[in-house]
Image (cartoon, rainbow, N blue to C red):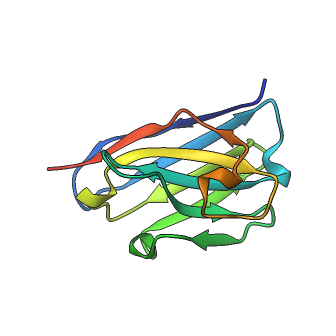
Amino acid sequence: QVQLVESGGGLVQPGGSLRLSCAASGFTLDYYAIGWFRQAPGKEREGVLCISDSDVSLYYVDSVKGRFTISRDNAKNTVYLQMNSLKPEDTAVYYCAATSLPCGWGPYEYDYWGQGTQVTVSS
């Protein structure tokens, strides 16, 4: 059974950090590009950044550059999203997704999705 499971979300104060994990089962992440998306209440799901199967990172949201980084550990079949200097506007449900295509910003380009993890940035 193909599955992606996110973890690591929670409540954090502005300026704080979180690391999200995206663990895959039922398939090997090595040959997939993995994207992180987020969806805030009342807004559409947006692509945040993606890591290719050759470990190239692409950013789709300018506001996270310099604050968010994506990495993968193929031995653990897991992708990580390190989020630093968090802001209230980063509050959203964060999803990871896998595609056999190159990285893309559109949700329709991805084959497999996790269930999401809530990130709330508030004092």
* 58 sits to left or right of 43: right
- Where is 1 relative to 67, above or below? above
**In this orientation, which residue lies closer to the viewer: 114 or 10?**
114
Residue farthest top in this picture = 1
Q: Where residue 95 sits in the image (x, y, percent)?
A: 53, 44
Q: Position of residue 83 (x, y in %)?
A: 43, 59
**From this viewpoint, which residue is outermost toward the left?**
123
Left or right of 93 in this view: 85: left
Percent coordinates x, y for residue 107 in the rendering: 60, 52
- Horizontal side of 92 relative to 19 (left or right) equals left
Q: What's the residue at 45%, 37% (across, down)?
A: 117
The quadrant the N terminus occupies is top right
- For the point 69% across and 49% down, which residue is it? 110
Q: From the viewer's perspective, is residue 66 above or below residue 98?
A: below
Report the residue at 31% width, 51% height from top: 91
- Residue 115, image quadrant: top right
* In the foreground, 46 or 62: 46
What's the residue at 28%, 59% (across, down)? 89
Res 27 quadrant in image: top right
- Comparing 106 with 48, the one in front is 106
Residue 49's x, y, as percent? 56, 64
